[in-house]
Amino acid sequence: MADPGSELVKIIFIDADGGTRECDGEIGKSVMETAVNDLVEGIVAECGGYCSCATCHAYVDPAWMDRLPAPEMIERDMLDGLLNVRPNSRLTCQLKVTEDLDGIVFTTPASQY
Amino acid sequence: MNEPRPIAEVPSHVQTARVVDFDVYNEPGLSHEFHETWLRLAGGEVPGLVWTIRNGGHWIPTRGEDIAKIYLDHENFSSRVMQVPRERMAGNRPIPGSYDPPEQNEFRAIINPPLLPRVIQSIEPTISGLATSLVENLKGRGECDYVADFALQLPIRVFLSYAGLPESDAAHLRHLAEEKVRPTGKMDVAEVMQALRDYLVPRIEARRANPGDDLLSQLVNGRMKDRALEVDEAVRMCSQVIVAGLDTVASALSFIMLWLSKHPEVRHELASAPEKIPAAVEEFLRMFPLVAIAREVRQDYELDGQVMKKGDIVVLSTMLHGLDERIFEHPMDFDLTRRRQVNSTFGQGTHRCPGASLARTELQIALREWLARIPDFGVKPGAEVLFTGGVVATVRQLPLVWQAK
Ligand code: HEM
Ligand code: FES
């Protein structure tokens, strides 16, 4: 659990082989930035967060799905074009870190291409 | 020798120790050793940021990390100027290449979807068919110019097929695309754009009246946030999608095949284990980047202890990222066991190549189908393989020979 008043929450990334990384997510930044800052290899993020490359794709733990805002049209359009897309697929650059997300778990796909 | 290359005066804000003489398009050396010549610029104790006196005078960051940082920072670096000297941009406003967000994002929301991996996967059989028929036609000849006979043929055919255009348009469109990127002087920029417009407008109008699911239909029926695309915008967008996807793929293929011609062990490994080709393509893309594109500094910006002034131009060499030895040990070595790290071969940030998935697929298929039929080949004895620098570097000719069975 995050300390009360802390600007950081825990975000967990599990890679396709099951390796787990626990990262400090700064409130207000994106989930993608959290991963990139911590060198989580499963998130590539070549466009830097413009919803333009779809290389920041991850699966949200289904238990957390409802706590995320629904994807906007531009994210849906990109997700539609991905391989290995699932109902819990999201582009992590479009998700802001909030207090509510403390402990959220994402699984990254085997490949972002 | 080459024509005299004009030298620009060094502005007073440029620190003397950073001044170099390097022509990003025509530096002697690029024609014989393209990537090695770029590496020499960045080697040794060279500062992280240099100023060259060629092409009007401009900055060149020499470290992969800084190149990535600038690609990712459109707020400080505008795409309005994509080439040097800046005068070369006159009358040339490619969409989306020369736009900045937020407009550029709106254009990209139109271009991205038809080029995403799932769509590209659905046209894989077409790409395989085209690649196969090109190799089958060449196989019995025992030799070819790989650039003209294969590398330039495949991407234009893939484009025409996906755009719902006849294969017989290939020569005309390629000619225009080439005039656009490497003007021969026979046509000026305005004439090339007019010819592209003459070609595209009737086809755009037909697809607006009667939309299909082809690439061109998807592009020209795309909408900006609150309006349709203007015809002129559609022309400029289609032109850039065409032009950007031809030479790039052709050059990447040609650099890879030249390298494979000298590395029989890797050739055989990939021919006998084609499942390794996708990973090999990633490593080749890192080793053989080919784009050197510019940005204009939007406000004074400090890098490496030097202020770049508003209005200065920066050329971002993707070569200097994938081959940066500070990031990739022994960068010229082909090594499938490297730790995966981002490079800038497809750019980064808001302009990051929308065609990356198509390009990767074309490269993978082209290598697979070629190696399955012609696993052994070499450069024709006595032939000299030369390169031409530019915004996109090209291989002029690659005469290959093999045992025709
Ligand atoms: C190996 C092949 C390729 C390489 C190395 C490559 C490289 C690049 C790079 C570095 C950029 C960024 C330019 C910048 O930041 O200003 C770019 C942009 C672009 N590429 Fe590619 N590209 C390749 C293939 C393709 C293909 C096949 C297509 C066509 C579908 C394509 C279409 C585009 C377009 C339209 C842009 C402009 C995007 C924008 O400005 O937002 N490229 N490419
Ligand atoms: S970082 Fe490119 S789409 Fe998310």
Image (cartoon, coloured by chain):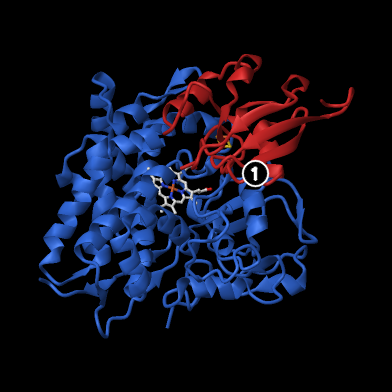
Left or right of B377 on screen, residue A110: right
Within 10 Å of disc 1 (Cα), the crowding (few <14, some 14-19, many 20+) is many
Q: Quadrant of the C terminus of chain B?
A: bottom left
The chain holding disc 1 is A
SS assignment at label 1: loop
Chain letter, red in picture: A
Q: Is residue B384 visible?
A: yes
Give the labeled residue for mark 1. A40
Q: Is residue B391 visible?
A: no
Name the foreground residue: B89 vs B399.
B399
Name the foreground residue: B27 vs B150.
B150
Left or right of A23 on screen, residue B62: left
Name the foreground residue: B249 vs A43.
A43
Q: Quadrant of residue B146?
A: bottom left
Chain letter, blue in picture: B
| Tag 1: amino acid | Val
